[in-house]
Image (cartoon, rainbow, N blue to C red):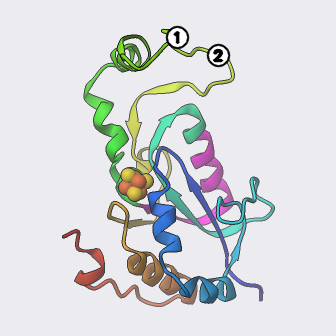
Amino acid sequence: MGKPVVATTSLAGCFGCHMSILDIDERILDLIELVEFNKSPIDDIKTFTKQCDIGLIEGGCCNSENVHVLRDFRKNCNALIAVGECALMGGLPALRNTIPVQECLEEAYLKSPTVDDKIIPNDDELPMILDKVYPCQDIVKIDYYLPGCPPRADLIWNALVALIKGEQMELPYEVVKFD
Ligand code: SF4
């Protein structure tokens, strides 16, 4: 039997959660022995080439492309893990949720003193911005949640290894606390 296949993506996130994955330090060598990576910024594979066992999702959904990618992950991964507060609750990008989208766009592109060309981008190729930022579980079924901003590397490692080996997740307070 081959190694479990893992895919990762960043939606409306800052890549800090991916940095936390890499923060497992030398255990990355063990991880490479344990799993095979498919679509992911870690190996720069841009499209799914096979059905994956685990999908790690960083970030929530702020535009139509995020929704498309997330649905694609749901279809191509047997289990999805929401990694970090942006994926779980929308995180920092969701701070805009109390302000109408048009107001946000005007503030960013028309009123900001640092913008030269005062135009709200509207090219057809740009993904459509959503009315608010949605956590992943509002769009697709999520199987596991790893909290934190970002989740600690030890939390990601413990959860991933347990899932791969089919063991009970050992998540002591030290790896899930935020202080
Ligand atoms: Fe970045 Fe924090 Fe969001 Fe992760 S949870 S993508 S570290 S802001």
- Asked if residue 120 is positioned above or below residue 169 in the image, the reply reads above
- Identify the residue at image location x=46%, y=48%: 13
For ligand 1, give the image quadrant.
Answer: bottom left
- Identify the residue at image location x=60%, y=28%: 127
Instruction: Identify residue type, mark 1.
Output: Asp
Q: Which residue is mark 1?
A: 117
Residue 102 lies in the magenta-colored region: no
Q: How many marks?
A: 2
Highlighted range, magenta: 68-83
- Asked if residue 1 is positioned above or below residue 102 in the image, the reply reads below
- x, y percent for residue 35: 67, 81
Q: Which mark is residue 123?
A: 2
Label 2, label 1: how far apart the Cα atoms are:
15 Å
- Identify the residue at image location x=46%, y=65%: 143
- Asked if residue 20 is positioned above or below residue 25 in the image, the reply reads above
Q: Is mark 1 within 8 Å of ligand 1?
A: no
